[in-house]
Image: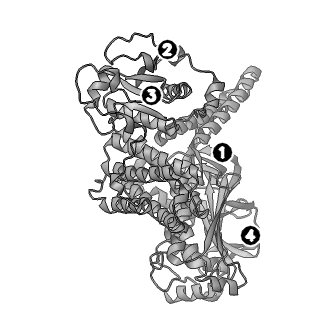
Amino acid sequence: MDNMLEMYLYETNTLLEQLDELLIEAEKNEDFTTNDVNEIFRIMHTIKGSSAMMEFSPLMEIAHHIEDLFFYIRENGLDAMSESHKNDLFNLMFQSTDALRGEVEKLENDEPLSTNIDSVITDINSFLEKISGKNASAKETGGAASDAKSSSAQSGPLSPDFLPEGTYPQYIKIMFEEGCGMENLRAFMVITALQEMDIPFLFYPADVENNSDTIDFIQEHGFYVCPESRELTEVAVNVIKEINSVSTFEVLDHAATSAPGENTAEKPKEQVNASHPSAVSAPASGSASSSGTPAKQSLISVSLSKLDSLMAIVGEIVITESMVTSSPEIQNLKLDSFLKSTRQLRKLTDDLQDIAMSLRMVPVSGTFQKMNRIVRDMKKKLNKDVRLTIEGENTEIDKSIVDSISDPIMHIVRNSMDHGIEPTTEERIAAGKPAQAEIVLSAIHTGSEVIISVRDDGRGMDTVKILEKAERNGLLTKPASEYSQKEILSLLMIPGFSTNEEVTEFSGRGVGMDVVKKNVESVGGIISITSELGKGSCTTLKIPLTLAIVDGMEISVGNSIFTIPIANIRQSFKAEKESIILDASGNEIIKCMDEFYPIVRIHDLYNIETDITNIEDGILIWVEASDKSYCLFVDELLGEQQVVVKPLPAYLNNFNIKDSGISGCTILGDGNISIILDVMNLYLVSENQY
């Protein structure tokens, strides 16, 4: 049951995201196309069917009434609707989508579903009455099933007269796997699959969706599908082959049909065992494509935990391969065939690692497209004319990171809408800007990172006012005159700080950017803000592609080996003793590119014994994380290496090890353990120590 629920939630969330994108695009075009109407009908029909199977009545009811509405629109055409009706339809659909999403979230949080959805149903029915001019509740949308006589409650053998009336040349008798259960709902899923392919057909029993009494009939006699033509029968057969619960099916001529339960007089045209597709005499691919059947995509859904396990095993293989090839026992031996084999093994493990990583990579388009809805709702409530431009939506990053950055991006977009964009069109025109404001959401690959930026052409940020408010709130740590523009803008990410004077629905409570900063840094990312008064602002997120593998620089301090992520390193250099000066607190600082940066000695921080304590003998590594920039003093650089990140043992959590500037560890090729340093936390630890 848990697997079924997981699949249901995945499918329903995917459909609701598709629906949101479709509605946003249609609203931009100020009209629905015929394809839009068909797609919405299909989405609602699918949600209704799967919700009915899972017995989630509120979701099924809402989807069923929206399906009724779009059945009417599909039958009567869009031209019959006025502009005001279309605007009302957009608002109604967004409201209904929110209601469906709200119920799905309750399922995800293991909360009971709503017992009263009358307001949503009433709104849908009222709108249907308004556009149809009659009582919507009397409208029947049984589709092809309306011609069928509902007589499943009768017992005993049925005559051919009880099959749906019509001129169809053939019908398909479907038998489901023995003991599969819920045959009526499995029959309903067959109906749904065929309707998604826009195949006109009749079926019997006609009331499988809501009549469990039909189970006995289907178990004994089967489920009957009657396509309108022989060509459509071939298409229907291709669809039925793909349905897992179908055991066998046979295609029979309508004129030669005898009563279900009796032996048929005619030899079946085609009998198929669904569990052995190789035995099927399938139509040629050319005829399938001419019938409009799309090629079936070879896609499967895999649990993220399984991908995590795969990545862990691949990491172990990489480490073991490195240990074998770096073994000191074979270093001085001339083994040509062995070296050739190890080179091939290295190539294969690199390929395996790349494939395993690619399985976890997903495009940011899903997260980006959700922002369309945020902008749409806010511009209506704030009465602002804004368009959202999305760039680089096909950029891929690790699935776990995508989930973590969704909320930060939403906060930033909301800030741009509320704080950044001018409140009136007149103000923009007076400033020499286009009447319509623009927010650009972009993503781009740069080596092992993805840079995501949200920029607007609004009024920008007044650094003078930000500094004044921070000073009033007692948030400054040094004289106001010493703050650079970058440092002033970083004040926006201090907890409790807000530039809004009034608390609104969207901002002013001082909650937002500090949470954004925390979430971004939790996945190893960096956030920065730039702004020009009167021109606009830009918030940039630098996010690692994956948390499983890190490009690192191996360093040594005494007998200990550490790894510093390459993404945090700006420069490494030798320094002279004369270039080191002391600040007012007696701490060492050094000048780099006209700026002074503090020096953190790793051996002092972790009490490591080493012979290298003079600045001239060691190496300084200039590192940066978020708004922190400083230099690390180490013994020597050992070289760059791609390492597999291993989490620290759980029992070390009792010692607050992660608050000591350590993010994880990795196993080197010689079997030694290297500690991975957390550049951001390391600086905070050194500040507390000194």
Along the line of sight, the residue nearer the viewer: 452 or 490: 452
Point out the tag, 4 or 3, that comes first from the N-terminus: 3
Label 2 element class: loop
For the residues labelled 3 and 1, say whether their Cβ atoms are less than 8 Å apart. no
* Residue under pointer 2: 269
Q: CA distance from mark 3 to mark 1?
A: 60 Å
Q: Where is 81 relative to 483, above or below? A: above
Q: Quadrant of the N terminus?
A: top left
Mark 4 or 2, nearer chain start: 2
Q: Is residue 571 visible?
A: yes
Vertical placement of residue 674 versus 30, above or below? above
Q: SS for tag 3?
A: strand
Residue under circle 1? Answer: 642
Q: Amino acid at mark 3?
A: Cys
Cβ atoms at labels 4 and 3 below 8 Å apart: no
Q: Which residue is mark 3?
A: 226
What amino acid does circle 2 point to?
Answer: Lys
- Residue 321, position as x, y percentages in the image: 63, 31
In this rendering, does residue 684 appear at all? no
* Dot 4 amino acid type: Lys
Badge 1 or badge 4: first in the primary sequence? 4
Secondary structure found at label 1 = strand
Mark 1 Cα shell of 10 Å, populated few (<14), some (14-19), many (≥20): few
Instruction: Kindly report which numbered mark, 1 or 2, lies closer to the viewer in this rendering.
Output: 2
Q: Which numbered circle lies on residue 577?
A: 4
- In the rendered view, tell whether residue 617 sits above or below residue 427: above
* Left-right relation of 299 to 531: left
Neighbor class of circle 3 (other Cα within 10 Å; few <14, some 14-19, many 20+) is many
Residue situated in front as seen by the camera: 161 or 227: 161
Assign a secondary structure to mark 4: helix
- Name the amino acid, label 1: Gln
